[in-house]
Image (tube, rainbow, N blue to C red):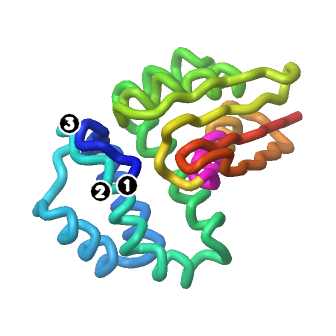
Amino acid sequence: MSHCTPQDTARGMFLNGMLKSIRALAGDAVAKQCLEASGHEQLVDAFNYPATLQLQFLSIAMPALLARCASHDQAMRKLGRDAVMDFLGTTAGRMLLTLSGKDPKRLVESLPSARKASVNFGTQVIEWIGPKQGRVIFKREFMPHAYYAGMVEMLLELGGATMVGVRSRQTGRVDSEVIFTWD
């Protein structure tokens, strides 16, 4: 949280999606506790909120998430996968899915624009190593690397990729890398 500035914001849609995932994985009581900690009775999808809220939600929910998931990374991957599905449920997300033609490469390449619709911080650089392999470099992103691995994994699967392999690692305090391949 110390790396977040007051200018770093996330859309309510993104935060509501995270609360929905927390509710599904950890229960209503934990999701309610997260929302109460935000200081809001509800979050409006179109409004911008401090990016620190997503980290507060994680801090509150992680003990319960760990009780339901085998590891921290598994919980974070699940939240990342859910974030993709929440975004694709929006008008912008449905349009992006239509424009991608359900092509794994095009879906991965859409990640930076999808992130810009959800948050106003961070950058993502996609590098292609081969026709069905590449990496995404995340700079100044506040979530753990496994979260972004879940996002990339879900995009590939939605694009029809099979035999998907995704590895991730933290490369700096708020930087990470996701390496992926598929058949």
> Disc 2 to disc 1, how far (Cα)?
13 Å
Disc sitting over residue 91 in the figure: none
- Quadrant of the rendered image containing residue 11: top left
Q: Quadrant of the C terminus?
A: top right
Q: Of helix, strand and loop, which mostly describes the magenta segment?
A: helix
* Real-space CA distance between mark 1 and mark 3, rounded to the nearest whole angstrom: 25 Å
Q: Residue 2, which numbered label?
A: 1
Which residue is labeled 2 in the image? 53
Whichever of callouts 2 and 3 sits on the residue coming sooner in the sequence is 3
The 10 Å Cα crowd at callout 2, few under 14, some 14 to 19, many 20 or more, is: some
Residue that mark 3 sits on? 46
Residue sitting at 28 percent across and 69 percent down? 34
Q: Looking at numbered disc 3 in the image, what kind of residue is underneath it?
A: Ala
Q: Which residue is nearer to you in this view: 175 or 19? A: 175
Which residues lie in the magenta part? 145-152
Q: Position of residue 141 (x, y in %)?
A: 49, 42
What amino acid type is highlighted by mark number 2?
Answer: Leu
Q: Left or right of 179: which side holds 45?
A: left
Q: Kindly state the secondary structure of the residue where label 2 is placed.
A: helix
Q: Is residue 161 above or below residue 68?
A: above
Give percent across and percent down for residue 50: 25, 47
Q: Residue at x 39, y 33 (%)?
A: 121
Q: Amino acid at mark 1?
A: Ser
